[in-house]
Every structure is written in structure tokens, then in C-alpha cells.
């Protein structure tokens, strides 16, 4: 009963968003409010797509998401494997430094990072948003290193020792033994990365200035402030705003339902050991 109550409580904002997206602009603020619209206005969705650049925003967002996914899945497992299996000077203090980056607020790094990327000439490109992932950068990169390290520690060393007896070197051991056994944990890292980059508003807002490069989140913010035919900063009707919000939310929800078993398995296998 408690779980059902909690589920209903946390799903209410999502249900309210869907309900509002299907109402007319005249009935959005009716009192008393109703969760079921008196009339379902399905045409709200095709109507908002005439003014909101969904296809362009989707393409831009996926370009960043794919770039970050590739960088993070290349760099994070290597760093985590080194911390889990190799003895080297200052291994413990270095791992603490990695963990400490999770606690550092993004705002503290904002100005130094902006100045560095400006000196590189990367402003108004996707490079400031994707390149740090090649070095396991960011708080999620540090968390991913920690998550995978815990998973690698749970893999018996006998697998690697048997492979070494057969002449398997470090890279072959890593590529053919460790990574295939780590698919659930890698899937968790990939899902976390996707959700973070899909929802990221702050980064694209700072580094992107050309409207044709805006992601869905930034395009949504800019579009919601101005009606297509209205003068100045005239907000869009609230039902239209909720319709676009529902469209943007749809992709992460579908992704979660398609991967929920793998996601839960990865969290259970990697987060509770070590």
C-alpha cells in the first residue's frame, strides 16, 4: 500500500503534464482542476510541431549524447580497471581525488572551464560538451569509475590469471575477459549518461549561441517564451508547453522500459559489493 501511494505521488506531475497537454487553452486553469480533460485535444501535438523545431533539436541532442557515450564508455572502464586490479604509487589517494570530484559543485568549475574552452576556440561547438567525457570528466564520470571499480572487484581474479597462463596480455585480458563480463554495469553507465546528457540544460545554454545548434532543452526554453506570431516575449499557451514537454520526456521513458531489467541487474551487481 505504501509503495502504491508513493508511486502515485511521484507519478502525479507526469500525469498532470499529460492531462494538461490534451486540454484546450481555455480549460487549462479551470477550477476545480480535473486530471481527465473534458475533451481530448490530440491535435495539440501536431500543432506544436509546426512551430517547435523538434527534429532539429532531437538531432543536435543525439549528436551530443552519442559523442559523450562513446567517450565515457572508452575512458571510464579503463580507469576503473586500473584502480581495481593494479598496484601503483598513490593509488588510494588518487582514487579519493576522483571521488572528491563528485562532491565539487558544477558552479565552482564553470568560469575556469569556460575560459579554457574559449582559449581553445571551442565556443559554439559541441566540443566543450563532449571532449571531457574522453577523460572520464564530470561528476557522473567519477561516479561511473566508482561503480565499475566495484563491479571489477567482484570478478574473481582467477579468470584473469587463467587467461594470463594462456598468454593473454593486459589488453586482451581486458577486452576479451573483463568487458564481456561487465555488460550490466556498462549498461548502467550508458543509461545514466544518456539521461544526464538528454536533460542537460546548463552546458548547452552556456557554450552554444547559434539557434541551429540548440539541443531540445535549450530550444524548448527559447520556444516557450515566444509565440510564433506574437510580439516580444509572449509565452506560449500552457497546453502547448506541456505537449512539447511530454514529447521530450517520451524518449527517456521508452529507453527506461526497454532496459529496466539490465539497469536493475547492473545496479545490484555493481553497487552493493567491494
Image (cartoon, grey):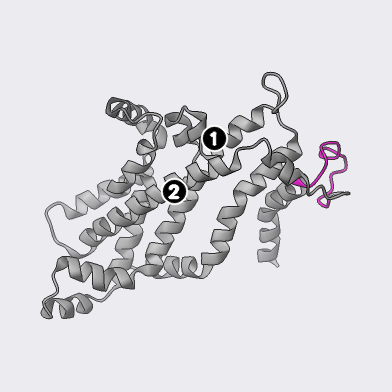
Q: Which residues are magenta?
A: 21-36
Residue 166 placement, left or right of 253: left
Residue visible at 55% across and 66% down in the picture: 258
User: Does residue 243 appear in the picture of this structure?
Assistant: yes
Q: Are marks 2 and 1 in contact (CB under 8 Å)?
A: no
Q: Secondary structure at mark 2?
A: helix
Q: Name which quarter of the figure residue 167 lies in.
A: bottom left
The residue wearing badge 1 is 218
Which class describes the residues within 10 Å of circle 1: few (<14), some (14-19), or many (20+)?
many
On screen, 8 above or below 266? Answer: above
> Relative to residue 93, is residue 221 drawn left or right?
right
**How far apart, in angstroms, are the residues tagged by discs 2 and 1?**
15 Å
At a point 35% along the width and 33% down the height, the residue shown is: 109
Q: Nearer the viewer, residue 141 or 119?
A: 119
Outermost residue toward the top?
A: 232
For disc 2, the marked residue is 65
**x%, y% of residue 112?**
32, 28
Q: Position of residue 149 (x, y in %)?
A: 29, 62
Q: Where does residue 129 sit, x and y in percent of width and height?
A: 39, 39
Q: Residue at x 28, y 25 (%)?
A: 119
Secondary structure, magenta segment, majority class:
loop
Amino acid at each position: 500500500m505504501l509503495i502504491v501511494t508513493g508511486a502515485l505521488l511521484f507519478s502525479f506531475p507526469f500525469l498532470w503534464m499529460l492531462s494538461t497537454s490534451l486540454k484546450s487553452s481555455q480549460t487549462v486553469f479551470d477550477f476545480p482542476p480535473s486530471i481527465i480533460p473534458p475533451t481530448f485535444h490530440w491535435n495539440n501535438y501536431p500543432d506544436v510541431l509546426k512551430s517547435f523545431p523538434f527534429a532539429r533539436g532531437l538531432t543536435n541532442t543525439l549528436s551530443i549524447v552519442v559523442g559523450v557515450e562513446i567517450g565515457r564508455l572508452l575512458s571510464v572502464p579503463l580507469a576503473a580497471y586500473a584502480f581495481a586490479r593494479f598496484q601503483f604509487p598513490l593509488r588510494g589517494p588518487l582514487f579519493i581525488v576522483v571521488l572528491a570530484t563528485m562532491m565539487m559543485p558544477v558552479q565552482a568549475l564553470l568560469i575556469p572551464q569556460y575560459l579554457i574552452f574559449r582559449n581553445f576556440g571551442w565556443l559554439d561547438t559541441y566540443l566543450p560538451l563532449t571532449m571531457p567525457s574522453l577523460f572520464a570528466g564530470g561528476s557522473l564520470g567519477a561516479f561511473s569509475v566508482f561503480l565499475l571499480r566495484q563491479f571489477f572487484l567482484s570478478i574473481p581474479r582467477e579468470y584473469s590469471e587463467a587467461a594470463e597462463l594462456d598468454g593473454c596480455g593486459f589488453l586482451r585480458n581486458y577486452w576479451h575477459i573483463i568487458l564481456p563480463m561487465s555488460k550490466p554495469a556498462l549498461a548502467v553507465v550508458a543509461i545514466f549518461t544518456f539521461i544526464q546528457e538528454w536533460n542537460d540544460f546548463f552546458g548547452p545554454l552556456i557554450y552554444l549561441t547559434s539557434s541551429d545548434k540548440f539541443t531540445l532543452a535549450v530550444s524548448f526554453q527559447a520556444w516557450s517564451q515566444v509565440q510564433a506570431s506574437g510580439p516580444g516575449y509572449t509565452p506560449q499557451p500552457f497546453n502547448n508547453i506541456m505537449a512539447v514537454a511530454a514529447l521530450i520526456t517520451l524518449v527517456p521513458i521508452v529507453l527506461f522500459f526497454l532496459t529496466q531489467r539490465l539497469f536493475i541487474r547492473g545496479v545490484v551487481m555493481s553497487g552493493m559489493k567491494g
